[in-house]
Structure formats: C-alpha cells, structure tokens
Amino acid sequence: GNYEALSIREAVQPRFGTGALLVKGAAAEAQSVATQTGRPNEPWDGSTPAYPSSVSTPDADPPAGRASTRFVGVIELDALRGLSKVGQAFESVINELDRTPDTEFRISLEIQATSESGFPQDVEEVVSDNAETLGFSSTRFD
C-alpha cells in the first residue's frame, strides 16, 4: 500500500530506471501525513491531505488564508547533465508556475568556471564573443 523511498519537499536527482515511479504530490503528501500520524496503511482516497502541525513546512509560509505570492528556487547544474536539468526545470517547475495567469519570471543562469592552469587566450576570446552574442548582461575573466 505505500511507496518505498518516497522523497517529498526535498531536492532529488531523478533516476528513471526499472521500478521508478512519479506520483502526484497529493498522494505523496497523504503517505507522508499517514506515516507521521501513525496510520501508514490507510489508502489514499484522492483528496488533498490535511497538514497536521507536526509536518514541517518552509519558514516563509504566508499567513493563514493568504496564498504565496513568490517562488525562488536555485538548482546546481553540472557541465555534463546541465542542459537536461534545465529542460526538466522548465517542464516541471516553470511551466507549472506559468499556469497562474499573472506570473512574471526572472530566470538567470550564472556560470562560474575556474582553471588552475588558466584559460588560454583563444578560449577567452571565443567565450567572450559567444557570451556577447547570447546577450549575457556581464562577463569577465580574472
């Protein structure tokens, strides 16, 4: 009756292999609430679960009765899988936020790279030209 290795309200690295399953947030919340209240085997009835006071919530919860008006999220990207993670972020986070009609976005990508041996002049020139063409607001090599 329960999902194993369920992760909720935390950053996870998606692993889509044998046995992987995405579940609706309400189902995950229901299992989490049931586990914390000592009723782990109650089936999920499809309703949105009530949140007991023992469930941890973010520190910046809006006052009762008022909807959140701001979302801020930061994701670390690596050079190998960064592009796919950006795509996943657009599909699973930005598209969901965009469902709210008056949502305004400010999306930034900050790149920090270091090389102990130093970047060759040709790399600096190509990167600087590409960054300018792409419309980077600021760039510098130190």
Image (cartoon, rainbow, N blue to C red):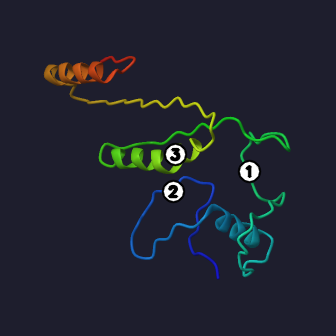
Give the secondary structure at mark 3.
Answer: helix
Residue holding disc 3: 95
Q: Earlier in the sequence, mark 2 or mark 3?
A: 2
Characterize the local packing of mark 2: few (<14), some (14-19) or many (20 or more) Cα atoms within 10 angstroms: few
Q: Quadrant of the N terminus?
A: bottom right
Q: Position of residue 77 (x, y in %)?
A: 40, 43
The answer to whether the residues at label 2 and label 1 have Cβ atoms under 8 Å apart is: no
Q: Is residue 110 left or right of residue 62?
A: left
Characterize the local packing of mark 1: few (<14), some (14-19) or many (20 or more) Cα atoms within 10 angstroms: few
Disc 2 from disc 1: Cα separation: 17 Å
Disc 3 from disc 1: Cα separation: 23 Å
**Residue sitting nearer the eye, 115 or 13:** 13
Q: Is residue 120 left or right of residue 91?
A: left
Characterize the local packing of mark 3: few (<14), some (14-19) or many (20 or more) Cα atoms within 10 angstroms: few
Residue holding disc 1: 57
Give the secondary structure at mark 2.
Answer: loop
Up/down of 63 relative to 40, above or below = above
The answer to whether the residues at label 2 and label 3 have Cβ atoms under 8 Å apart is: no
Residue type pointed to by label 2: Val
Residue type pointed to by label 3: Asn
Rendered image: mark on residue 117: none
Residue holding disc 2: 12
Q: Position of residue 36 (x, y in %)?
A: 76, 68
Please report the residue visible at 78 percent of the width from the left and 40 percent of the height from the top: 62
Q: Quadrant of residue 23?
A: bottom right
Q: Quadrant of the C terminus?
A: top left
Up/down of 93 relative to 3, above or below = above
